Image (tube, rainbow, N blue to C red):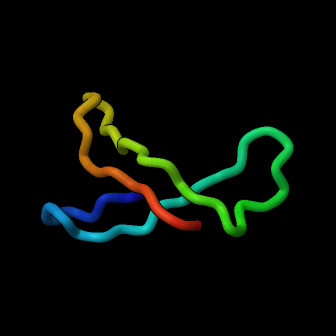
Amino acid sequence: ANLPPFAKAGARLDVTVDALGDAVSLRGGTLMLTLLNGPNQVVYATAQGPI
């Protein structure tokens, strides 16, 4: 995900997800709570929800 400059707490952003293993589709899946860390290991955002 790209966090826009000056994003405020609670703002929505687009994230990109990818399949692991031999999955051929993510349709109907759910992204589990995922922490989005910066290079300094600070959590800048979280993502979760239907795909």
Residue 7, visible in the rendered structure: yes
Q: Report the side of 25 relative to 9 (left or right).
A: right
Q: Is residue 18 above or below residue 41?
A: below
Give me the residue at 84% from left, 56% from top: 24
Q: Position of residue 51 (x, y in %)?
A: 58, 67
Give me the residue at 43% from left, 56% from top: 48
| Quarter that holds the N terminus | bottom left
Give me the residue at 13% from left, 65% from top: 8
Determine the image quadrant of residue 2. bottom left
Give me the residue at 47% from left, 62% from top: 49
Q: Position of residue 12 (x, y in %)?
A: 30, 70
Q: Report the side of 33 relative to 45 (left or right).
A: right
Q: Position of residue 37 (x, y in %)?
A: 33, 38
Q: Residue furthest toward the top?
A: 40
Count all numbered tags in the image, as a single digit: 0
Q: Report the side of 17 relative to 48 (left or right).
A: right
Q: Is residue 15 above or below residue 23?
A: below
Residue 6, visible in the rendered structure: no
Determine the image quadrant of residue 4. bottom left
Q: Position of residue 3 (x, y in %)?
A: 31, 59
Q: Is residue 1 above or below residue 42?
A: below
Q: Report the side of 14 relative to 11 (left or right).
A: right
